[in-house]
Amino acid sequence: QITLKESSPTLVKPTQTLTLTCSVSGFSLTAPGVGVGWIRQPPGEALEWLALIYWGGDKRYSPSLKRRLTINRDSSKNQVVLTMTNMDPVDTATYYCAHSRIDTTSGWYILDYWGQGTLVTVSS
Amino acid sequence: DIQMTQSPSTLSASVGDRVTITCRASQSISSWLAWYQQKPGKAPKLLIYKASTLESGVPSRFSGSGSETDFTLTISSLQPDDFATYFCQQYDNYSWTFGQGTKVEFK
């Protein structure tokens, strides 16, 4: 059974760096064809993809946020960590991590299992 | 970025209705489109990928169609559990984008 659980501070101040941790179970972060992504959703708004780390260690980032994001993993702890620098009130959102598997017919990855999300508020 | 535009933003329907949601991409994405269902306070659930492939365990009343820029999600007979918000997402390149969502509410 694949499960993911996000953890983070609930409140961060503007200009601070946010560290989000995704703890996973039911799969290996290094299993071929697997990835873990981060997606956020501001209150009442649409989803926004942030970053993805693939089983081989390759990383992809949203072009608009790339300069602020870093994704890493600790396979021994079954965790994926996303850091976002220079936080701003507009970054207030629920942050989700999600398991991604390869769609073998396209070679692209799809998001198939999601965590419950963690709400992060940015305020002084 | 590829922009994804959904319509309508809100849809009022009754149990048993046939419901259709549209998603349009700003450029061709072949068939690399997924649909998700989200209920308040819950994580999104994958319903369909590759425009028309039903994810395992998803009821057959859900179906998807389309290619290139125009896509449709259809619920053949709306059930009480289906009142939720639906999002489309393109995965044609390494910069994934989502539609703004369609809320299906009780008429």
Image (spheres, coloured by chain):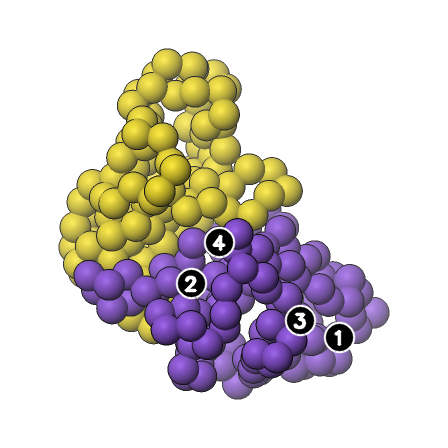
Chain colours: A purple, B yellow
Q: What number is the disc on residue A14?
A: 1
Query: Residue B105, position in %: x, y?
Result: 49, 25
Indicate which disc, 2 or 4, sits on the residue closer to the N terminus.
Answer: 2
Picture disc at residue A100? 2
Are discs 3 and 4 located on one and the same chain? yes
Residue B65 lies in quadrant: top left
**Gap in angstroms between the C-alphas marked 2 and 4:** 7 Å
What secondary structure is marked by label 4? strand
Distance of mark 1 from mark 2, alpha carbons? 31 Å
**Nearer-N-terminus badge (3/4):** 3
- Type of residue at label 1? Pro
In this view, the residue in front, B50 or B86, is: B50
Look at discs 3 and 4 and give the one toward the viewer.
4
Q: Could you tell me the amino acid type at mark 2?
A: Ser
**Is residue A38 depicted above or below A111 in this figure?**
below
- Crowd tier of the residue under label 3, counting other residues whose Cα lies within 10 Å: few below 14, some 14–19, many 20 or above: many
Which badge, 2 or 3, comes first in the chain's sequence? 3
Residue A72, percent from left and from top: 56, 82
Residue in the image at 53% along x and 52% along y: A1
Relative to A93, B73 lies left or right:
left
Q: Could you say which disc has been placed on residue A20 in the image?
A: 3
Q: Nearer the viewer, mark 4 or mark 1?
A: 4
- Say the numbered circle drawn on residue A113: 4
**In screen coordinates, is A75 left or right of A9?**
left
Real-space CA distance between mark 3 and mark 4, rounded to the nearest whole angstrom: 18 Å
Chain where mark 2 sits = A
Which quadrant of the structure image shows residue A7?
bottom right
